[in-house]
Image (cartoon, grey):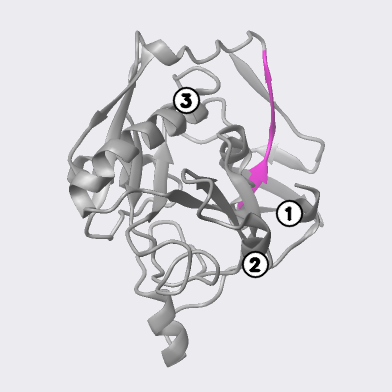
Amino acid sequence: MCRLVSTDTSLQEHKTSHPAPSCTSVLWKRFYIKSAGSINFKYSLIRTIIVSSEPKALCDKNSLVLTRIPNRLANNLVVQYHYLHRPVYIGRNISYGVTYKDKEGLGVVMFGYPIFREKENLVGEDAPLQNGELVDMVRVWLPDSFPSGSESCTIGKGIRLLKQDWPMLTGKEAKAVITFADAEFMHYGTVYKASNFILMGYVKGRKAIAGSGHGRWGVAQRAGIGQTAGTKKYVFLYIIDKEKVDVNALRKTYMQDEKTILN
């Protein structure tokens, strides 16, 4: 059981034929919005405070199991359940299915090549890491039935498996893992911080539209067509080889705000 608490009394939940949402920190909600005596319909992405009547159990690492699964199955899961509702297009990926003892559902975590080949003080010909040594954690999704903390358990186990499996796929050792939290979807990387990722700063990147595919960001920017910049994507880095990356030098290459400065 859970109840949603909102401080905005102008919003009343719109009752639809859809099932009630499960407990989650960020929800797509449809609301009645009262204004000037009329009622307008609007879809809003809101942050809600979840107050549970029963404390949710914590993740038991021994009960959470990751198994290599085909990328096609992983993409089917993220298209259906992940907030972006679109597949991963990168050719060489490693996907793990995530199960939890006595809990229904199959989760997924996907790793692949970053969309960029060069980044100052990080990856490229004259950078600390060579192409193939930086891995992008491109998707994470778990069923709501899984216990609290399952995301960080999944990421930790996923990276340990990645260190074994990535060299067999690419011939390169994974030296660092990068991932992004899109503030436009009210994602700020809390799970990544709990998983020992370092907040580096933010980029604008391409604007993400749920359910919509995209082409190459760099190509579109050079051509001046096809895509628009996003607002803010926070960049998180998990360093496997601690001697390879100069964190302070890398931070200087990203934009900063109050969240990154206080990190």
Residue under circle 2?
Answer: 254
Residue 252 location, quadrant: bottom right
Residue under circle 1?
Answer: 260
Give how far across and how far down residue 165 sits, in percent: 25, 40
Q: Which mark is residue 153?
A: 3
Indicate which disc, 3 or 2, sits on the residue closer to the N terminus: 3
The verdict on residue 23 being magenta is no
Give how far across and how far down residue 181 sits, in percent: 56, 51
Mark 2 Cα within 10 Å, few/some/many (few <14, many 20+)?
some
Distance of mark 2 from mark 1, alpha carbons? 10 Å
Residue at image point 40% right, 36% down: 159
The reply, left or right, for residue 95 in relation to residue 177 is: left
**Residue 16 sits above or below residue 246 on the image:** above
**Residue 197 sits above or below residue 144 on the image:** below
Q: Tell me which amino acid carries mark 2.
A: Tyr
Distance of mark 1 from mark 3, alpha carbons? 24 Å
Mark 1 Cα within 10 Å, few/some/many (few <14, many 20+)?
some
Residue 196 location, quadrant: top right
The verdict on residue 47 being magenta is yes
Secondary structure of the residue carrying tag 1 is helix
Residue at image point 52% right, 26% down: 22
Give how far across and how far down residue 37 sits, in percent: 79, 53
Q: Tell me which amino acid carries mark 3.
A: Cys
Secondary structure of the residue carrying tag 3 is helix
Indicate which disc, 1 or 3, sits on the residue closer to the N terminus: 3
Secondary structure of the residue carrying tag 2 is loop
Distance of mark 3 from mark 2, alpha carbons? 28 Å
